[in-house]
Amino acid sequence: MDASDRRVASWRTSLASKAAFEATPLVVDGVLYLSTPTSRVIAFDAATGTSRWVYDPELRPHAQLFGGDVAGVALWTDSGKRPGEPAFRLVYVAR
């Protein structure tokens, strides 16, 4: 038995979606960013699972932006700005 056989989840969450989906989360500076089938983007504290913020474009299930085929998120950081300034870090829904 190696170390990977002994791993257990540190935390779990419910995304309140009945749709089956696969998404690639992104972890940057201790924050886990995840997109959902309805194009919501959720930021979690990666260590505790506490939700930090949610962006919800309020798309109805029949009018999903990408037809539910959301692969994950992409992140861009403006090197000309300091942390805390507007638009220092932007998160995009990736397809």
Image (cartoon, rainbow, N blue to C red):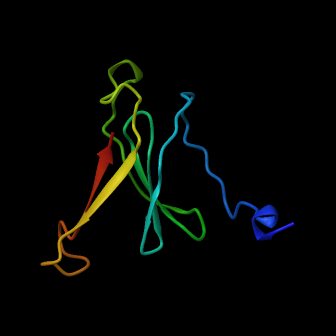
Q: Where residue 59 sits in the image (x, y, percent)? A: 33, 30
Residue under the point 25% across and 76% down:
84
* In the image, residue 80 above or below residue 42: below
Could you say which quadrant of the image residue 40 lies in? top left
Q: Is residue 42 left or right of residue 1?
A: left
Residue sitting farthest toward the top: 62
| Residue 69 percent location from the top left of the image | 40, 31
Residue shown at the point (54%, 28%) measured from the top left: 19
Position of the N terminus, as image quadrant, is bottom right
Task: Please tell me which residue is depicted at 32% across the width and 21% down the height of the picture.
Answer: 63
Q: Which of 47 and 73 is in front in this view?
A: 73
| Quadrant of residue 6 within the rendered picture | bottom right
- Residue at far front of view: 1
Nearer the observer, 17 or 27: 27
Residue 9, percent across and down?
Answer: 71, 60
Label count reads: 0
Residue shown at 33% from the left, 34% from the top: 58
Q: Report the front residue among 1 and 84.
A: 1
Quarter of the figure with the C terminus: top left
Q: In this view, does 57 lie to the left or right of 41?
A: left
**Viewer-nearest residue: 59 or 69:** 69
Q: Which residue lies furthest to the left in this view?
A: 80
| Rendered position, 42 above or below 62 | below
Residue 68, position as x, y percentages in the image: 41, 29
Q: Residue furthest bottom?
A: 82
